[in-house]
Image: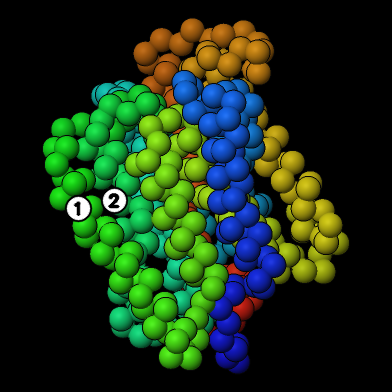
Amino acid sequence: MTTARSGWLVSPRWDLATFAGPALLSLALLVAGAWNGDLDGDTPAWAWVMSVVFVDVAHVWATLYRVYLDPVERARRPGLYLGIPLTAYAAGVLVHSLSPSWFWRGLAYLAVLHFVRQQWGWVRLYRRRLGDDATLDRWLDDAVIYAATLYPLVYWHASLPREFHWLIEGDFLPGLPAATAAILAPLHLAIGVAWVARQIWLGLSGQPLSPGKIVVVVTTWVTWYGGIVLLDSDYAFTVTNVFVHGVPYLALVWRWGRERHRGAHHGVGRLFASGLWPWFVLTLIALAWSEEWLWDIAVWHDHETLFPGPELALGTTWLSLVVPLLAVPQATHYALDAVLWRTAGGDPAFTRAIGLEGRS
């Protein structure tokens, strides 16, 4: 069976809510931050909870539903699903024992790769959904999404130190010459112009367009450039970075779960029944809150009012055991995300969820 071409993964309503919605929320929060002064200084607690805990950390725990609470998926690749967290912890303990700064640096760059590749993955899925196999479009789509994400990262590295960081202060490698960003800026602009020109030409010539793909590219460009290049603000980076990444992932896991557990009347599958999505989200928020509580009392000690309890004064050896353990969900999510959403030979519930059933 081959599904019909479509410029949307699911529907205009679902796609716009999933991709345009978080970007509009980010921009609205930027406007609010400029008005009330939140663009200056650290991200306020309310924004940190709303974005980092309720979205960023929560979406990491969604991997629990996608893999570890699904017996069918666990049985497909048990060695991979057990080996990745064990390897992540063992490697984390080793690296942290040698150098805590290099532990955080490695985790930060793994996160960067994950964020960049997720945007690339959305574009690839849209191209598959449209049935677009043209070499020119494949090259331009790849180029534009990498330009939209990598150029801001180059600019960031070339202008260190900034008022924000990815995970902790000093996690990015310094030393990139400041002129690098200026040299690459024309290429960054040229790729964007070429991609826009191609979309206009396709539309004028009557060839099929993917409005969903256009939304992903434009929102990625706006939020990454605005949050990293235009504004030097911890608050601005947080709200533009987190929502565009985490909300679509949560929506995708929910959409997958609806297909995977269709008709289920027991176990985890019941959570994906129609109308129960708030419970799906709340369970992830509860897990995220619990994780951040452990981080705060054991490592950070900087949100006492949010996470009350005894502060643990861990020594160097204990930190090298505890920090990698707390980072296992994050590292596991980064690694598994590279294989979970492949359409070729992957989970049929996923291909059904986005209209790719029958396509290899």
Looking at the picture, which amino acid does disc 2 mark? Tyr
Please determine whether, in this image, residue 173 is positioned above or below residue 195.
above
How many C-alpha atoms fall within 10 Å of the one at disc 2: few (<14), some, or many (≥20)?
many
* Residue that carries the numbered disc 1 in the rendered image: 184
Residue at position x 23%, y 52% in the image: 185
Looking at the picture, which amino acid does disc 1 mark? Leu
Q: Nearer the viewer, residue 267 or 47?
A: 47
In the image, taking residue 106 as reference, residue 177 lies left or right, namely left
Q: Quadrant of the N terminus?
A: bottom right
Residue at position x 46%, y 11% in the image: 314
Q: Are marks 1 and 2 in contact (CB under 8 Å)?
A: yes
Whichever of labels 1 and 2 marks the residue nearer the N terminus, that label is 2
Q: Is residue 87 visible?
A: no
* Residue that carries the numbered disc 2 in the rendered image: 151
- At which x and y percent is residue 173? 23, 33
Please determine whether, in this image, residue 328 is positioned above or below residue 70.
above
Quarter where residue 107 is shown: top left
